[in-house]
Amino acid sequence: MTERRYTNHKYLDAIEKKVLVFDGAMGTSLQVQNLTAEHFGGEQYNGCNDYLVISYPEAVEKVHRSFLEVGVDVLETDTFRSNRITMAEYNLQDRVIEINETAARLARRLADEYAEKTGQPRFVAGSIGPSGKLPSANDPDLSNVSFDDLAETFREQAVGLIRGGVDLLLIETSQDILEVKAAITGIHKAFEETQVYLPIQAQVTLDTTGRMLLGTDVN
């Protein structure tokens, strides 16, 4: 078996010692701030929470600080939808790396600030949500993407997060195990490109029967 190599081993060291508490829902926390189209940078970006790290970072910082104040160990970046496919809805597909790097740098700065202030190590997880596609399906709209294109989509996002200084990459709320595989493939390509190797944490969404959205198991 090939030994895994990590550039940043701090997160793995920490979870061997204690249970690490992650922050809560970024979207819900932003919603209660009653932000307007102006905060999002104009009507064309209204509702694009991920773009707030550029258009109105104060809102995202407020959320991060609220969780750090109550003692969470891990901040998730405001990048759940920050991939080329979903950002195309706002014509922001060519700013994916910029958005992810900016979000990661914001979370990194605050995590480091609170770690220094409290003496409690704080970590940053690069949030990678689903693309909105279901490659395992036979739907003309939801499955009209190749595995290689999906892997490239996630590679690009991961590069931005890595450049911004995250401690781990978090694949979350995944509904298609084939997309999870594409995400991990793309992330490994980002590792090779950046020469930074980080832990990967993958989460999937299951129904009450233990199966994924398409009725498949996680194997």
Image (cartoon, grey):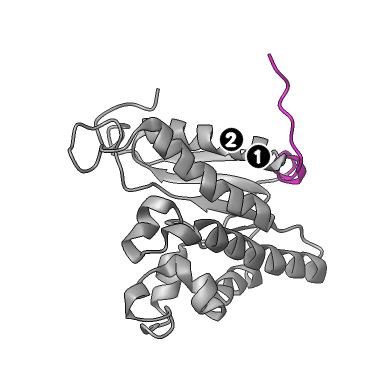
Residue 92 drawn at (x, y percent): 42, 63
Q: Amino acid at mark 2?
A: Lys
Question: In the orientation shown, which residue stands out farthest toward the top?
Answer: 1
Q: Amino acid at mark 1?
A: Glu
What's the CA distance linking mark 1 and mark 2? 6 Å
User: Which quarter of the picture shows residue 153?
Assistant: top left
Residue 166 drawn at (x, y percent): 66, 53
Image quarter in which the C terminus is found: top left
Disc 2 packing (10 Å; few <14; some 14–19; many ≥20): some
User: Which quarter of the picture shows residue 192?
Assistant: top right
Residue 88 drawn at (x, y percent): 35, 58
Question: Is the C-beta separation of discs 1 and 2 under 8 Å?
Answer: yes
- Residue 124 placement, left or right of 206: right
- Mark 1: secondary structure: helix
> Against 71, is 131 above or below?
above
Q: Which residues are magenta?
A: 1-17
- Residue 70 placement, left or right of 3: left
Q: Which mark is residue 189?
A: 2
- The residue where tag 1 is placed is 193
Residue drawn where x is 58% and y is 55% of the image? 22
Residue 171 drawn at (x, y percent): 49, 44
